């Protein structure tokens, strides 16, 4: 172990060992009374089955889960994203109130295996040893469940030319604290030819030899098992995935006509993942030990015209990652307002990547290898200041403070430190405040430094020549990246004035400032090309040939945003109950409406000192300032539907070569709607005898981009620039998917 890391760990441990006087933990199922003995006293702990350490902000029961008509738990978590207020962020997942790192198989379980799902309050991430600010969702499984499930689906583009088919089969079993699952998935997408959109479908047409979207085949296998091992619970997960893509890159040059009718680009990737988790009580601590191993292989082949024939550029890469993480938590001190709880996280990671190029050009070496070891330590404390249930400390309501400090060290890098502070205040049952601040010294991640080298053909708009271009898009790691600092601030308020209907209003301000370090390569615009001229290669005629889109070094990256949301949820169950005992009973309807408004207040990227910053909101990149996402879900046992929409405000993209604005690209506002309907015929039939084949059958219809909208762009004179026609902007357009899911 590196000496700086060892010193950091040794400095953290004594702070907890000397303060530990109590041991409160739930080992048995949380809905049963269980007796736990410590060296000094016995404590009886009674709680709800699967309850988390933090109160839920929103909780969905079986009736609300049924209303979404999801095909899997993973699908359900994606569908309820508007309820977390962060539609583009996948939340941290707990299972029955416990950390579930590596338990990927749970995503494939049918939603019928859930007893309830809880979206926890914002402070939950820190309480479980995760970075602050992330949302946490607790999946509470039923104590007993067993089912086979098969699913088949087909999707088509209404404009033609693109079809998709997928199949899956799985077995899912839950028996108390034990569960296991096995699932296989396969899918196929045919390619979308340019001729399908241009209308030039002749045999000799160049458009018939170029794809707008590639053909692909994918297959995935997953096995996941969890079972008690004495006082511990153990989980083992195995994932294997394979994906092949094929695209046509245009006609073969005349002087190489014998080589084929079209240039090709082929990619193949294989991924293997193994993870093991062991959790339970050990020496007075609640312990989670996670080990992961991942390995990936990929091969790319791009054919290019090169006199006197065709040149094939090939790349091959291998990467692997091995990591181990120990999470320890326990109460350490009892204060008048409650118990101080601690969380220690110790981790170690080893990464290795090797890439090889064959026949390529440019300033990249033919062989690239990267190795790194990293060690992490984090100590967090949750300190209650005031409690509404305390006789002496109730005037302020519920008030607590979270403090976390950590250190990281990696090969060739000095010790990096971080400090996170959080405050949670509930002065009234209907009102909640959350504030956090984070300060961290950062080193680039292993992927940013040594990610596998890759070359792909990407279809983008070239503003310089005002045309669609298909340059070689280069990805991978950048070994020249340096260290940086990150500061995060957020303030969140939540108000729930009514319980029936349940109304939740939220508002959150976020500010993030990164100085130095690494960032993503931004969307290629004239301002970005002027800031990174060495990243863009053009031929003698000015045609875009390649773009080096690997991570960039930054001087400063500043983002400020305000998120406001409203959620209204109610059930018709109360109206049904009011009809009297003799009235015919039907499943109540569940209705949930969520609206989230995102307001980007400021967004600037400074690439190098002395250069003007790239202002993302004032024309340097394609970025809307305002966005509104909404979702309406109406459903009951047996049928339902959801409408999702997204609106983005208009903006202008400036042309630095024409400061007067005549050549500004005026992007209009755009609204996209999606519609999803589902039905379970057996649950709707009123007859006493129902066909057996209808049992547990779910049929769903999913329409993406219901009205076929797209972002319209005009120049100052009102004309549409070349490359911004309907199917230039969005080649796929509206799609319709029909899926059938059957449990048996």
Image (cartoon, rainbow, N blue to C red):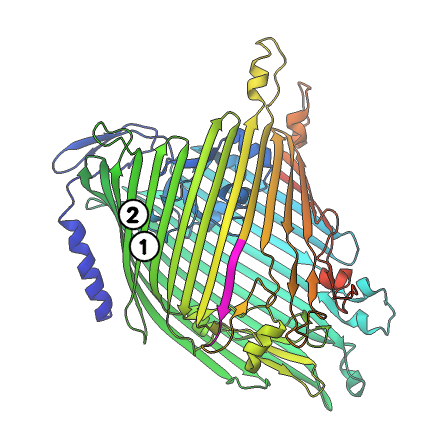
At a point 59% along the width and 17% down the height, the residue shown is: 576
Instruction: State which quarter of the image contains the N terminus.
Output: bottom left
338 above or below 543?
A: above
| Between 298 and 139, the one nearer to me in the picture | 139
Residue 402: numbered disc: 2
Res. 37 visible in picture:
yes
Residue 158: numbered disc: none
At a point 48% along the width and 51% down the height, the residue shown is: 223
Query: Quick one: label 2 or label 1, which is nearer the N terminus?
Result: 2
Percent across and percent down for residue 540 are: 69, 88
Span colored in magenta: 600-608
Furthest residue toward front: 660
Would you call the spot at circle 1 few (<14 residues within 10 Å), some (14-19), or many (20 or more)? many
At a point 38% along the width and 63% down the height, the residue shown is: 486
Q: How many marks?
A: 2
Q: Which residue is mark 1?
A: 420
Please say if the residues under marks 2 and 1 sit with CB atoms less than 8 Å apart. yes
Residue 332: quarter of image: top left
Percent across and percent down for residue 675 are: 68, 42
Furthest residue toward bottom: 308
- In-image side of 521 versus 509 (left or right): right
- In-image side of 43 versus 212 (left or right): left
Tell me, yes or no, whether the highlighted magenta stretch contains residue 5. no
Magenta-drawn stretch, dominant element (helix, strand or loop):
strand
| Between 706 and 354, the one nearer to me in the picture | 706
Percent across and percent down for residue 513 are: 42, 62
């Amino acid at each position: 172990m590196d000496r700086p890391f060892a010193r950091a760990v040794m400095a953290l441990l004594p702070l907890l060992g000397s303060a530990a006087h109590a041991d409160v933990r739930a080992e048995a199922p949380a809905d049963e009374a269980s007796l736990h003995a410590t060296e000094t006293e016995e404590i009886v702990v009674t709680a709800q089955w699967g309850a988390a350490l933090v109160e839920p902000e929103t909780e969905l029961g079986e009736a609300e889960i049924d209303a979404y008509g999801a095909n899997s738990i993973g699908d359900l978590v994606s569908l309820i994203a508007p309820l977390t207020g962060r539609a583009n962020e996948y939340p941290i997942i707990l299972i029955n109130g416990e950390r579930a790192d590596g338990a990927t198989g749970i995503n494939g379980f049918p939603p019928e295996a859930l007893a309830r799902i809880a979206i926890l309050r914002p402070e939950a991430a820190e309480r479980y040893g995760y970075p602050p600010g992330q949302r946490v969702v607790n999946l509470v499984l039923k104590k007993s469940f067993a089912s086979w499930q098969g699913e088949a689906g087909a999707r088509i583009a209404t404009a033609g030319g693109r079809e998709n088919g997928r199949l899956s089969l799985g077995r899912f079993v839950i028996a108390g604290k034990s569960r296991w699952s096995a699932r296989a998935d396969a899918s196929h997408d045919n390619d979308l030819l340019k001729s399908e959109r241009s209308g030039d479908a002749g045999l000799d047409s160049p458009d018939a030899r170029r794809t707008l979207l590639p053909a692909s085949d994918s297959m995935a296998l997953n096995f996941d098992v969890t079972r008690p091992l004495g006082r511990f619970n153990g989980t083992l997960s195995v994932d294997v995935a394979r994906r092949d893509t094929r695209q046509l890159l245009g006609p073969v040059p005349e002087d190489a006509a014998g080589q084929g009718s079209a240039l090709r680009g082929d990619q193949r990737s294989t991924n293997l993942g193994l993870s093991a988790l062991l959790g339970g009580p050990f020496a007075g601590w609640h312990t989670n030990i996670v080990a992961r191993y991942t390995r990936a292989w990929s091969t790319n082949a791009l054919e290019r015209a090169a006199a006197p024939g065709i040149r094939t550029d090939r790349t091959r890469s291998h990467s692997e990652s091995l990591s181990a993480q120990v999470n320890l938590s326990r109460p350490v001190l009892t204060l008048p307002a409650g118990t101080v709880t601690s969380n220690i996280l110790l981790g170690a990671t080893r990464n290795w990547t090797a890439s090889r190029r064959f026949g390529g050009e440019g300033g990249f070496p033919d062989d690239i290898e990267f190795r790194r070891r990293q060690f992490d330590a984090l100590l967090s404390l949750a300190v209650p200041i005031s409690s509404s249930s305390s006789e002496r400390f109730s005037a302020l309501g519920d008030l607590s403070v979270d403090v976390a400090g950590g250190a990281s060290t990696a090969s060739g890098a000095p010790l990096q430190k971080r400090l996170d502070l959080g405050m949670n205040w509930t002065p009234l049952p209907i009102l909640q405040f959350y504030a956090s601040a984070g300060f961290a010294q950062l080193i680039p991640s292993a992927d940013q430094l040594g990610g596998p080298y890759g070359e792909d053909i990407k279809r983008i708009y070239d503003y310089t020549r005002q045309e669609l271009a298909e340059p070689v898009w280069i990805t991978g790691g950048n070994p020249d990246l340096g260290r940086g600092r990150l500061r995060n601030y957020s303030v969140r308020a939540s108000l729930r004035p009514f319980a029936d209907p349940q109304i939740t209003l939220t508002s959150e301000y976020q500010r993030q400032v990164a100085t130095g370090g690494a960032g993503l390569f931004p969307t290629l615009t004239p301002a970005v090309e002027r800031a990174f001229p060495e990243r863009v290669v053009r031929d003698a005629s000015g045609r875009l040939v390649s773009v080096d889109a690997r991570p960039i070094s930054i001087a400063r990256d500043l983002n400020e945003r305000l998120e406001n949301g409203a959620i209204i949820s109610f059930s018709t169950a109360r109206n049904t109950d009011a009809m009297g005992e003799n009235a015919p009973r039907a499943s109540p309807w569940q209705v949930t409406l969520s609206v989230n408004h995102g307001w980007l207040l400021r967004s600037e990227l400074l690439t190098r000192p002395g250069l003007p910053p790239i202002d993302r909101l004032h024309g340097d990149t394609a970025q809307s300032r305002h966005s509104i996402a909404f979702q309406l879900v109406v459903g009951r046992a047996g049928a339902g539907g959801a409408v999702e929409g997204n609106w983005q405000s208009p903006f202008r993209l400036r042309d630095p070569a024409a400061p007067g604005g005549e050549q500004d690209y005026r992007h209009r506002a755009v609204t996209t709607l999606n519609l999803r309907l589902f039905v379970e015929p057996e649950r709707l039939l009123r007859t006493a005898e129902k066909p057996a084949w209808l049992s547990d059958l779910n049929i769903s219809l999913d329409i993406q981009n219901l009205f076929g909208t797209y972002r319209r762009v005009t120049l100052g004179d009102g004309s549409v620039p070349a490359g911004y026609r309907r199917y230039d902007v969005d080649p796929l357009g509206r799609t319709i998917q029909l899926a059938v899911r059957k449990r048996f």
